[in-house]
Each structure stands twice: as structure tokens, then as C-alpha cells.
Amino acid sequence: MSDSNQTGAAVAVRGLCKSYGNVQAVNDVTIEIGRSEFVALLGPSGSGKSTILMSIAGFETPSKGDILLDGRRINEQPPHSRGIGMVFQKYALFPHLTVAENIAYPLRRRGLARAEIARETSRALEMVRLTGYGARYPSQLSGGEQQRVALARALVFHPPVLLMDEPLGALDRKLRQRMQIEIKMLHREIGTTIIFVTHDQEEALSMADRIAVLDHGRLQQIGAPRELYDMPANAFVADFIGETNLLDVEVVESGAIQTTVKLLGSAAGFRCGPSDRPVGRKQRLGIRPEHVEIVDAEEGIGATVIETAYGGATTNLLLEIGTQRLAARVQVQRAHGLWSVGDKVRVRLNADTCRLYDS
Amino acid sequence: MLAPILVLFLAAYVLPLGGLVADSFQREGDFTFANHTALLESRAFRIILWRTLTLSFVVTLICLLIAYPLAYVLARLPSRWAAGLLLLVSVPYVTSILIRSYAWVVLLANNGVVNKLLLASGLVDEPLKLAFNETGTYIGMVHVQLPLMVFPLYAAMHRIDRSLLAAARNLGSTAASAFWHIFLPLSLPGVASGCTLVFLSCLGFYVTPALLGGPGQYMLAQGITVRVLTLADFAGAAAQATVLLLVVVLLFVALRRRFAAGLGIESTGRSGRTTAARGLRAWPAPLEAAIEVLSGPLRALGSMLSIVGGPVVAVLAVLALLFLIVPLLMVIPLAFSDSPYLTFPPPGYSLRWFKTFLANARWLDAAGFSLGAAGIGAVVSLIVGIPAAFAVVRRPMMGRLPLYLLLISPLIVPHVIVALAMYFSMARVQLIGTPLAFVIAYALIGAPYVFVLFVAGLLRFDRSLEMAAANLGATPVTVLRTVTLPLLLPTLAAALLFAFIIGFDDVVFGLFLAGTNATPLPIRMWDDIRLEISPQIAVVAVLLFAALALAYAAYLALGLLGDRRSRMPGGGPIA
Ligand SMILES: Nc1ncnc2c1ncn2[C@@H]1O[C@H](COP(=O)(O)OP(=O)(O)OP(=O)(O)O)[C@@H](O)[C@H]1O
Ligand SMILES: [Mg+2]
């Protein structure tokens, strides 16, 4: 495969809607994916990830909207002629065919000569490091091996686009991490465009060039992992990507330089970046636990430690300010003297790391 | 995809049955209830109806009592063993009903094996009357119906999570109370299914009561047959058949959700419920009450089972198995008898009865005819049944449930009714006594088996395999050829086997549709058994056993082909 000069194709999903009866599985989703890009579709269960993937593969017909492959509309094209590779959630290896026959399947459908099929098949087995496994049946393989056969079968015909629906969901943690790296390396090597469905945010963050976050059939945000992490578009994304404290606050003063908010249920106030939110509006203030600072001086806001958890290089604290709770993650070397439950501490939230979301 | 089966059903089933019901309302061309009122006023008919209902009920109860311990033991065995023993249980089910009845005649007649043993042991002074009366009917019917009870019971018990019992014990239950509060309720869906099947199947029973029952002690099916074939009272027969049909259809409609369970429609959205709750909710209230009554003896039995414990249950299970198998085995030595009469054990052994069989063109013609007609009928039922199963499982459609029920209903409606209806309608087009009539009849009774097996097979089928094939470049036809059909090969084999056997073993359609050019083997056997009981039938039985063994071997081979993935040596774990 390594000599394949085929690079990925661009995929566009435009204004995609899909409803089943009165369930709106996908609601006006637009995603533009560049050649050889690795995009993860991330979202909770039932958010419409599989439906989008199935629409691209041709197993679902969109209720509205278009699917484009390199700018060409393929809505009406039947699945078997789309030439898009796919790895199914439970692999869908043909149980009555051997590993080699499974991998040869797409080549035979394309009418390749026998010798060429044999050559491509063994090359694909080599690519996934399963040389010598060709004569086995899928039931004689471990989960990880089955996963690799599925990958080889989906890639053996050099598809310009590879779809993967939670391909690592059935594997244990160790194996999953190894496969994540293997898939990434493979992607770099062959340059196929990959659309990868997962509900595991760590997996999406570590693998994808860009992540599309979905909820309730709607696209919440699409962007590079850092972008999503640092500048979540809304409270859902902030909460879904990484951990976030969401505090209920009320705007006290807003302007071009800074916004001041008051924590509900206590007298404490915080400063955030500039905004034009009207005074008196209820908001949610998002801050990640690692951005919560514990300070000695008189400058911070008083809080009570209600739980502590040792986390290796960091210590996790659960704090209470008034009636609201705040999680903090503190570097251990700065944690001179460990805190215990009931301690009074003072915290500071840096304005740059606080974000306001509509509640 | 539904057109072929609908044409078959319309022509050979729905219209004839409609005609039969219409006929029952006619006398000399006028619409009338006279036939029915005459029937209901007839004391003889009321006695027959009552006998049929009580006999069916009692047989159902006895089957339940015998089958429960057997299924209980089977469900606890490692599945490899259970599969083998279930195969034993199924042998009688696929053995010609004539042969089973013949075996019981050999055992139970005045000079039969049982009486000989009893006399020799001095337990009785004169032979007990065990056959050709109600006792004979009961014994024969229980034997015939027992497998129908064992299978659903086993299926239900097999699903019960044994750790529930362990948990109950752990929480302080005694063994008896764990059985009583946990196992028994969870097995009730199997009890319900088994009782339904056996009861409905008993209602229309013909062969066993006719051979083992007493003279004049008719059940409904015999009453109907005699009326047509002996008395030529067509209107009366039509009226009787209509009454029986009404009873069956009412039960069928009342239990439709239970029958439709195989369609998987009911299971959606209730996944959180236990099997027991789901099973019982499908019962209408009166039947639930009936189950309650039925479970009285069960409870007593259950307490006994768990108190007396393993050994007694195991003994009961072994006895049940012996009861199923031994009568059939008895037949084999008889085939090699050198006596002109039926005596057991045979005084000497020879192949004389095989020779007379092979020298007799009438036997050979009948065997050839049956093979051909049942074979063609089975193929036709595959051709109409498979597309129908695909349509019902995979096409979105209105009225899926009624359609499904219609297509499985020939499994439930007594054959005697369908045969009578065909007899009337085929007489109009001069088909009686032709091979075509048999092909149509066999295709009709085989098609529901094919349909049900394929519906089950398709519901189990992992659709993502077909999607994967399409995604890899296979056109829909190629998907079917390279993935769907190869994986359904075991289902195909089972469907072919069942469709063939159901036609090949049929007696009832033969009685109505046979003619000089079209006499199936079971009718030859039937005549032979009724005229004189000789070892000749035993020869046929042995040949049939051999054929069955061959067919089963072919089935296994076919199944292995499609199933080699799970039988490969050293198969690794599936993730
Ligand atoms: N064939 C269908 N009929 C009816 N509703 C459907 C169908 N397929 C999907 N849905 C609904 O559409 C919504 C989106 O489903 P989808 O399978 O795309 O979710 P998902 O994000 O892949 O979830 P998961 O992580 O659980 O796989 C869900 O609410 C689901 O119930
Ligand atoms: Mg999904």
C-alpha cells in the first residue's frame, strides 16, 4: 500500500438532515473535510454520529442536504459503487470466509486478476502485521487481530475515504491505545481521508486533526483539538471535551475591557474577559480544574476543602464556595503541605481562563 | 416477493377454507344454519366435541408433567450433552406418525410385549386392555406430542440464569423455595408455549386415535373424515369442520401475540423486563387462570423435585427419554422377523419381509410417488417461503402481523380441515387423485416451516455483514450470493428437511386426495396396518429410519459447510 500514489478525497456534508418518524437524528449538519484529513465525529450516544457516517457510506438516504465527494454530489449513488472504505463497529468480518478471502473480497468484486489479488492481499496482511494469518477464520482471531483484518479489508482497494464507526469500542484499554497509534501511523503513511466516529473524547483528542462535536443531531462545534479545548463554543462542548467547572453566575458589569460576575449563593465576584452581556443576566462560568489557582495571600476568594484525591503528579480538590462546588487540580510540588478536608483556602480564577456561556 | 406464496395460499388454503365455511351454510342451494343447528342438537356430536376437548386437555397436562423434569435435567446438562439428548427427543417427532402408532400396537396389544411381560411376571392373570380403547389413545397421543412440550420448556429453562438460583440460596432461600419462587416463574413462558402447541395440535389429531383408540370413540377429526369418506355427508362434514376451525381460529387469535413472538415485534422496547413477565403479559386473562390451574400440579412436582433432589428428577428424565425412544427401537428387530405374524420378540430372523417389500410393485410405486411428490412439494415451499420471509422481515409494510399470522397458520389449523377444504375445491377442477394435488398440498403444509425458519434466521442475521459487502463493492445480487445465502445455508438445510418430512409423513391429505395413480407411501402403510398387523410395516419403518439418518447426515453436512467457522479446530475466542 505504501507505494499507493492515491491521496484522500475531500468529503462535504452540507445541510444534512435525517429524521426517523418524528425523531430528528441529524439536524442541519454541515462539515467540510479536506483531502487526507483525519476528522473525528464525537458526541454522546444517540447524537447522530452513526447516521452521518451511514449517509456518507450510502446506507441512509438524507431527508435533506447533500453528500459530496471531491465536489461531486453522490446522494443517489448506491453504496457498492461509492468506493468508500468502512470499518464497522463490530468489524463485520464474513464468518464463512478466511482472513485472506475476507481481504480479497473487495478485490474480487473489482474483477482483479488472481495473481494481483494474491499479491495485494498479502501486502495488506503485511501492512497490519498479520502475515501468516490468511488461512484462519475470523472466529480464530483475537479482538485486536479481527480489528486489524477489518482495517486491511477496508484499505486493500485503496479507497480515497475511510469511515470508521467506533472501531476500537470492543477492545480493552491497552489494545485500544496501541491501535490508536497504529491507525494514526497508517493514516500518515497512506494519506486516506479518515472520518472516525467515537464517543471517547480522549481518543478524539489524541487522534484527529479536527473534531466535530455533535449533540442531539446538531453540530456543536468543529475545530482542532486545542481550539475545542481552549475555546469551547458553548457549555456542552466545554463540558464534553475535558473537564470543566460550570458555575452559576450573574453579570454585574460588562464592557470592552472586562466583565464582572457575581457567584450565585455567595458574595464572591470574579472577573472575566470582555463581553456585551447585559447586566443582571444569569450565565454559566466555565473554568477547567487545572486553571483554578490556590493562593496564600489575602487576594483570593475563600473556599472550603470538602474532598481531596491524590492523583500522582497532581492533587484533585473539591472546593465549596457558598453553595457551589468547584473542582481544582493542583501541581503537587506547589502543594506545600497537603490539604485535608475542612481546610479553608483561598482561590483565584484567572480572567483569561474563565469563559461565560448562556445558561 | 410475496406474490408466489400469496398465490399458493389463496388457491390452496384461503379460498378452499372460505368455500368450506360457505358450504357449511348451504343446504340444497339455500343459505341456512340448519347444518349447524343439526350438529349442535346431535348428542353424538356433542359427545365427540367434549371428548376431543377433554382428551386434548388431559394429554396436554400429562405431557407437561412428563416433560418438565426431562427439560429440567436437559437444561442443566452441558450444552453438548443436551444437544445430543434433544436430538433423541426429536427422533420421534420426525418419525412417521404411522410408525409410532404401529410401535404402540406392537407394545400394547392383548398379545403385545407389555402384556406378555405382565403375564410372565404373574402380576396379572389376563391381558390388560391397553390398546384400541381410551388408554391406547392417551398413551399414543402423549408419546406423539411429548417432543412438542419438551422443546419450548427446554428453551425457556435454558435461558434461565442459574446464578439467580445461587443468589436466592445465598439470600437464605431453601432449595425448594428458590425453585418455587425463581425457577418456576421463569419457566412459565415455556410452559405456556408448550401447552398451547400441544393442545392445539391435539384438537385436530387423526392418526393416533384412529389406530389406537376404541371403535366408535371418535375424535373430531375422525368424525369429519368418516362423514365424508364413508357416509358422503358433505354438508355435515363441512359444518363439523367449521366448528373445529372456529375453535382453533379463536384460540389462535386470542394467542396471536404469543405466536407473533417469533417475529420479534413484541420484544422491542421491553428489553428491561424479565422473560417471565414478558411471557405472561402475552396471555389473555382466562388463559392466565388456566395456567394457574395447570401450575398447581407443577408446584407440587416442583417442590418434590427440589426436596427429593437430583436422583429422582434424573430417574424421571431417563424414564421420559426411554418412553420416547424404546417403542421406536422395538420396531427394528421386527423387520427382520422370519414369522408371518407379528410376534415379539421374533421367533427367528430373516430378510423375508424385506424381500416381499422389494418384490411388491405397490409398495415401491408408493415409495417412489411419495419421494417425488414430497420432494417437489418441499422445493416449491422453499421457492415461495424464502422470498416471503425476506419480505416480512426486511420490507417496511402495513399489516405485517396479520400477514405473518396467516402464513404460519397452517401449522396450527388441523390438517383434516385443510384437507377437507382442498378435497371439495379440487373435486371441482378434477385434481383429486393426481400427483399435482399432492404437490400443492405438500407445498402448502411445508411452506410455513420454511417461512418460520427463515424469519428466525433472518432476524438473527447480522445486517452489518451485508452492509460491509455492499461497501466493499458487491451489488445487491452479489451480496445475496456471496454473503446472505451462504450464511443461511444451515437454515436452508433445516427448512428443506422439515418441508420434505412434513409432506412425506402425511396421512390425512393422502386419505382425501389419493387416487389410483397417486397413492403415497403413508396411505399404503395405513391400509396395511388397518387390514392386518404384519411385520411388513416394520420393514418400511427401518427403511424410513435409514432414509432419515441419511437426510440428517446430509443436513449436518450442509450445515457444516455453512458453519465451518465455528467448528474449526482450535478456534480462538470471539471478541
Ligand atoms: N433506523 C432508525 N429508526 C429510528 N430511529 C433511529 C434509527 N437509527 C437511528 N435512530 C435514532 O437516531 C438518533 C441518532 O442515532 P445514531 O445511531 O446516529 O446515534 P450515534 O451517535 O451513533 O449513537 P451511539 O454512540 O449510541 O452509536 C438516535 O436517537 C436513534 O435512536
Ligand atoms: Mg453509533
Image (cartoon, coloured by chain):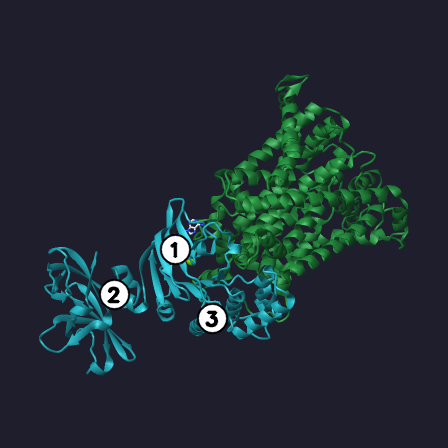
Chain colours: A cyan, B green
Which residue bears the numbered disc 2? A231
Quick check: marks 1 and 2 in contact, CB under 8 Å?
no
Mark 1 to mark 2: distance in Å? 24 Å
- Label at residue A13: 1
Q: Secondary structure at mark 2?
A: loop
- Label at residue A190: 3
Q: Is B293 placed above or below A214 here? A: above
Chain-order first, disc 1 or disc 3: 1
For label 1, count other residues whose C-alpha is less than 10 Å away and answer few (under 14), some (14-19) or many (20+).
many
Which label lies toward us, 3 or 2?
3
A302, A281: nearer the viewer: A281
For label 2, count other residues whose C-alpha is less than 10 Å away and answer few (under 14), some (14-19) or many (20+).
some
Q: Position of residue B234 (x, y in %)?
A: 71, 24
B340, B361: nearer the viewer: B361
Q: Secondary structure at mark 3?
A: helix
Quarter of the image containing the N terminus of chain B? top right
Which quarter holds ligand 2? bottom left
A187, A299: nearer the viewer: A187
